[in-house]
Image (cartoon, helix red, strand yellow):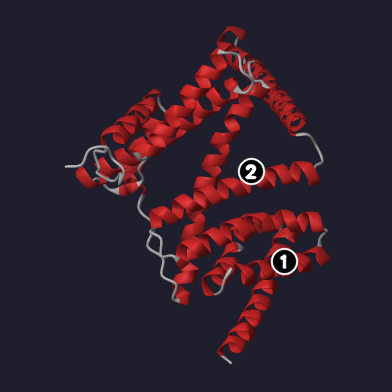
């Protein structure tokens, strides 16, 4: 009898969640301005089903919602909208069900968001835009260069009309030279960094939204750690440095993909260590120096847009190596 009640309850809740997921997908489809908000909310019904039941019930509900959404949209767009819902929702549900810490949950969510973003990009290019990835990048780079050059030409004409001499517009010519150096390889090397940053922001917002909703349903989630507690462990640092070294070796031997691995891993490593340096600096200013949050934001903001921003890369590496904040559970030496 208990199994029958359980099955009935699971079917009812799965059906309800399927309708909720479908409604959110349809709303975000018709109202693009709500698409990002929908992306943050969609994984939550999936996570709730995973927490309460199992993979079978969860996947069944997603499949039903996919069919319902396909009735309104075409199946291709329905699948496109379902990809992040499945991956992020199941990962979130797993972490909550297993009572993972906020840092572990956030780490898994970053990985889930990264995988989701890669799959949605590949799927949209293959089945929606129906264009080869390299052709897309080539066209994108060409449009970017043309747009930037047009903007510079327009700005130069405005300045000349106001009586500024061509010699005083040398900085615009330097921008021209910089734009001409843009190529497909440069943009390809920037893609992993772009995916990482977008996934980091999305995962952080996913956690905040999920915590606000799930806590009201008596599913406890820890408060997300403050930015000053963000740290890059020795293991992550070693992997990043190892990727760069492998890329350098492959590039020096003219092996296909070596230049991409070298450039993209260097940019990714620089980005992650800068974030680590910013977190360490925030910790020092907020916790050690007791400065107010607005003052800290002002200091970090001014230094980030100045030539001093490279100092955060150095701080990030030193923090990873020596773990001054004692936050890395895998640090080499313990006292």
Quarter of the image with the N terminus is bottom right
Nearer to me, 307 or 77: 77
Q: Which quarter of the figure is the C terminus placed in?
A: top left
Task: List the single residue furthest toward the left.
Answer: 335
**Residue 329 circle label:** none
Residue 262 appears in the picture as rendered: yes
Say left or right for 255 vs 201.
Answer: right
Q: Check disc 2 and report the residue beneath it.
A: 118
In the drawing, does residue 98 fall left or right of residue 145? left
- Can you see residue 275? no
User: Which residue extends farthest bottom?
Assistant: 1
| Quadrant of the image occupied by residue 174 | top right
Which secondary structure lies at badge 2?
helix
In this orientation, which residue lies closer to the viewer: 150 or 1? 1
Q: Which residue is mark 1?
A: 63
Question: In the image, is residue 131 above or below residue 90?
Answer: above
- Report, in whole angstroms, how far the alpha carbon at label 2 lies from the one at label 1: 21 Å
Quadrant of the image occupied by residue 64: bottom right
x, y percent for residue 65:
72, 68
Q: Residues within 10 Å of mark 2 (few under 14, many from 20)?
A: few
């Amino acid at each position: 009898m208990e199994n029958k009640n359980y099955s009935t309850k699971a079917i009812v809740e799965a059906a309800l969640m399927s309708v909720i997921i479908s409604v959110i997908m349809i709303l975000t489809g018709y109202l693009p301005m709500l698409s990002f908000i929908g992306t943050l909310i969609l994984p939550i019904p999936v996570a709730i089903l995973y927490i309460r039941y199992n993979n079978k019930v969860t996947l069944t509900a997603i499949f039903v919602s996919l069919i319902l959404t396909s009735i309104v949209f075409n199946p291709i767009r329905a699948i496109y909208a379902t990809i992040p819902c499945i991956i992020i929702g199941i990962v979130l549900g797993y972490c909550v069900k297993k009572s993972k810490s906020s840092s572990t949950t956030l780490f898994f969510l970053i990985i889930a968001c990264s995988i989701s973003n890669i799959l949605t990009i590949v799927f949209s290019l293959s089945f929606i835009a129906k264009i080869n990835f390299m052709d897309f990048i080539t066209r994108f780079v060409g449009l970017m260069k043309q747009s930037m050059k047009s903007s510079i030409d327009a700005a130069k004409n405005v300045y000349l009309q106001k009586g500024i001499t061509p010699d005083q517009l040398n900085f615009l010519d330097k921008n021209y030279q910089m734009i001409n150096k843009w190529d497909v390889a440069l943009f390809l090397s920037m893609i992993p960094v772009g995916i990482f940053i977008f996934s980091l922001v999305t995962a952080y917002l996913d956690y905040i939204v999920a915590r606000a909703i799930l806590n009201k349903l008596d599913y406890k989630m820890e408060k997300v750690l403050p930015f000053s507690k963000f740290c890059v462990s020795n293991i992550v640092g070693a992997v990043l440095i190892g990727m760069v070294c492998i890329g350098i070796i492959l590039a020096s031997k003219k092996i296909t993909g070596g230049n991409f691995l070298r450039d993209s891993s260097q940019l990714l490593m620089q980005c992650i260590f800068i974030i680590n340096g910013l977190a360490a600096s925030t910790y020092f200013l907020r916790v050690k120096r007791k400065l107010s949050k607005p003052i800290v934001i002002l200091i970090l903001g001014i230094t980030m847009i100045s030539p001093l921003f490279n100092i955060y890369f150095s701080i990030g590496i030193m923090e990873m190596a020596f773990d001054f904040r004692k936050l890395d559970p895998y640090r080499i030496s313990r006292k």
